Image: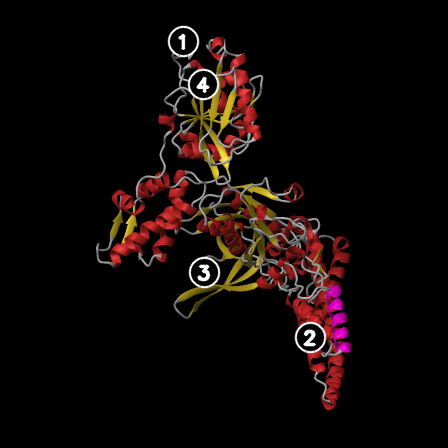
Amino acid sequence: MTDLLLVPLEDTVVFPGMNVTLTVDVGDEDRVVLVPRHESEYAAVGTVAEVTDHVRIPGGMRAVSLEGLHRGAIGAAHSDALGRLRAEVEERPDENPPPVQTRDLEREYRAVVEEILDLRGADDRVREFLRAITEAGALADTCAYAPDITFTQRVELLETVDVVERLQRALALQRERLAELQVRRRIRDDVEEGAQKQQREWFLRQQMNSIRKELGDDEGSIVEEYQAKIDEAGMPEDVRAHAERELRRLETMGDASGEASMIRTYLDWLIAVPWSKRSDETLDPRSAREVLDADHAGLEDVKDRIVEYLAVRKLRQDRGIPNDRRSGAILTLIGPPGTGKTSIGESVARALNREFVRMSLGGVRDEAEIRGHRRTYIGSLPGRLVRALRDAGTMNPVILLDEVDKVGADWRGDPSAALLEVLDPAQNHSFRDHYLDVELDLSEVFFIATANVADTIPGPLLDRMEVIRFDGYTVDEKTAIARGYLWPRQVERNGLREDEVSVSDETLQLVVSEYTREAGVRQLERELGTLLRKTATRIAAAQVEAPVEVDIDVVRDALGRQKFFQEAAERTAVPGVATGLAVTGTGGDVLFVEATSMDGSNGELVLTGQLGDVMKESARIALSYVRSHADELGIDPEVFKDRSFHVHVPAGAIPKDGPSAGITMTTALASLLSGRPVRHTVGMTGEVTLQGRVLPIGGLKQKVLAAHAAGLTDVIIPERNRADLDDVPEDVREAMRFHPVMTLGEVLEHALEAKPKPSLHAV
């Protein structure tokens, strides 16, 4: 082992036999070891080089001339007294193998390189240099002089100490270069042949154009113009043939024909499709995540899915795997209004460096809006997808299908059925618009659909979508969004400067909790806009001087009295009221189930609050369970005689349905009849069976967020929903206690106050 000064080379490889000059100070060293380095990673083998000269270059810097001698395996590294890096080097000069092992390899290597030089038209001096090399190892090292060899391949060649193996590796690299050059030559020959054909056709067209001008015929110029546009459009061969067929029809019938204008309109649309244009996609998952984080707070599931999509495309590209036309991404973002579903589309497009087009589908009832009209109709047009591609100017934009759950159907067809082909990765590479009547490849389009609820999306369409749920924001997330996004935007929109108005996080949290109760942040932005408008008015009227600190008094003055209250404690203070959790079209919500009894017919049940059929059945199941388990609940069975019961669910103006209020109704009736109030900190959700089993429900995350916003600290959930708690934000999980249950007995144990009061019968 030899101790040598280590000289790192950034993205450069020096081989034995090479002479280089480097701007480094090697002191009095006679020999050094040159080691390639890429992103702080050193190669395992370097080149032992002899210092042949010391030179001084302009600017006072020192440089040395070095000559590569042979390879050296790098061992342990250490610093010397001057702080320079040194390494233990096992010098490995080339051991020339018997000619019988290398003769055929050398002959083939020289032949391949000769062909490469012929294709490149290289100087004869290169051939003479190659012929002068007699040693097999040095011959293999000449591969490093090739300009097409990458840094990684050079390092691999340097690290191949065995001469036979190195010659085999060099031969493989040169074969790859030869194959690539041969393909380029064939392409160039084909292009030249095609160019000659086009030149001949151009000359003939020019002659035809001159003849038409002599005859006073201008139709030729129109045909020429369309032909030029078709040539520039880069259409696929079948589409180009179709376009030229229509152009010949136009040329034959003349511009005076009534159908000529229809053909010209058709050709205009066909040319408007950006057949050969594509955005240069940015395949950098880390950069994309930074863009998404900068534009939106939260929404981790969406961001993760976009980053995964990018990472897969990057891996396929880096590893030379061709793109699969059937692997398009079609994400569907389902969640309450105001949670950022629509705006995420623009951020995705910016992160991918693609064009962005938004298609609003709310209220669309005509199938032709998607597929286009047949050309036989007067005034027919392509569908919205063709128009979206035209507006984007590329074949790989991000297209946002907004409000896909609000697509309707009537006698003009069902647009959602037309979307089945569009949103199916196995079919959309050959989408056919009725107007264009040619195949469109939509496989490169990144489709993002948005919806408020999944119930109104047809099953076959929903099956083709990759659904990502937006379940709303926590109070802390809303406060962070208000601070980082909404407040600066409203300050600018209201003509204010950042230094003129300020607000604390406590005040923002007050606005969030006392003036809004929504899953998204749309109403929150409106409230902040009102707050800043009134502040801007006071500043403009010289009633106050900037800077203005927006505090609680300013909020009360601008927004009025508190709009939302945490009233669970007041509502559940008396027996017969239980706090349930529900999911509405605007996110999670807290609802109170009230039960009372009165003299009347035996066991009659009255239900109010615009309850659906399923919810009414849950109420009947609840009453039946309480009657059949009266002894276990400490209820006198006589209480049910000659009495009727009334269950009401405020707010009465809002329709409600679903089975998840089953345990809430049971708890309300049990609380009423046992005289035990429901704990005011408890919210609950779960479907109930006649035997008292608690079944799983949906929308758990939205319900938990609503319970947290309403000030509840305990939530009773079905045992089979325990795994869904992983979706709940960690800060909310830490602030609340969850009680997974399997039976109604467990529900009542957690929900009712421990000390029973006298029963209703006793009263």
Residue 89 percent across, percent down from the top left? 54, 48
Q: Earlier in the sequence, mark 1 or mark 4?
A: 4
- Whether tag 2 and tag 4 are in contact, CB under 8 A, the answer is no
Mark 3 is on which residue type? Val
Please say if 23 is above or below 744: below
Mark 1 is on which residue type? Ala
Residue 508 percent across, percent down from the top left? 33, 43
Magenta range is: 237-253
3D distance between C-alphas at marks 3 and 2: 63 Å
What number is the disc on residue 24? 3
Which dot, 3 or 2, sits closer to the camera? 2
Q: Residue at x 51, y 54 (%)?
A: 346
3D distance between C-alphas at marks 3 and 1: 100 Å
3D distance between C-alphas at marks 1 and 4: 14 Å
Residue 183's image quarter? bottom right
Q: Earlier in the sequence, mark 3 or mark 4?
A: 3
Left or right: 65, with 100 as reference point: left
What number is the disc on residue 597? 4
What number is the disc on residue 762? 1
